[in-house]
Amino acid sequence: MDTPTASAKKPLLKKWWVWVLIVLGIFIIIGSIGGSDSSSSGSQSAKEEVKVEPALTVTAFKMAAEYKENEVAADAKYKGKLVEISGSVDTIGKDVLDTPFIAFSTENQYEIINRIQCMFGKNDVEVLSSVSKGQKITLRGTVSGALGNIIVKDCEIIE
């Protein structure tokens, strides 16, 4: 009567905890190899110089006139580019998403489309509260194109 006894031992590789340790060890080795690669490429990219194009300088009247004359040509010139726009403040307000903006006066003061609308961050409300209608200012931002108005995003007052 040969019956297996409780004292019989399993071979080491048939124990589940050994396999868990082996798999965990493999993950640690792969992670350390992958981690060293990404850190070396990260330091290389940090050493590379980032070339920043200078901002295009334009008056609000000129930009509005260019968009009114030929929106396609104006988009090719300004869209996606950093611009510094100078002009007189026509409107200071918030849009439907509660985002603060400044709109510049254009050639025709009664024209409500084709204005230049410069969008600011919600934390810039305090800065905009010091601006008044008719004040001459210069703003810097990135043109995102015309959508009724000419939209300039991520604006900051520089003068």
Image: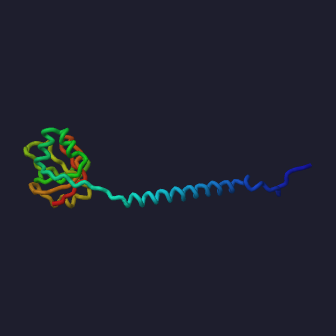
Q: Quadrant of residue 128?
A: bottom left
Which residue is at the front of the view, 52 or 131? 52
Q: Quadrant of residue 6?
A: bottom right
Assign the C terminus to one quadrant of the image: bottom left
Q: Classify residue 86 as left or right of residue 3.
A: left
Which residue is at the front of the view, 64 or 75? 75
Q: How many marks?
A: 0
Scheme of image coloration: rainbow
**In the displayed structure, would residue 147 be above or below residue 20?**
above
> What residue sits 21% from the left and 61% below the top?
126
> What residue sits 85% from the left and 54% below the top?
5
Q: Percent from the top left, x then y, of residue 75?
A: 21, 42
Q: Percent from the top left, x then y, of residue 76?
A: 22, 42
Which residue is at the front of the view, 94 or 138? 138
Q: Percent from the top left, x then y, of residue 42?
A: 42, 58
Q: Classify residue 56 as left or right of residue 40.
A: left
Q: Percent from the top left, x then y, of residue 10?
A: 78, 54
> What residue sits 13% from the left and 40% below the top?
68
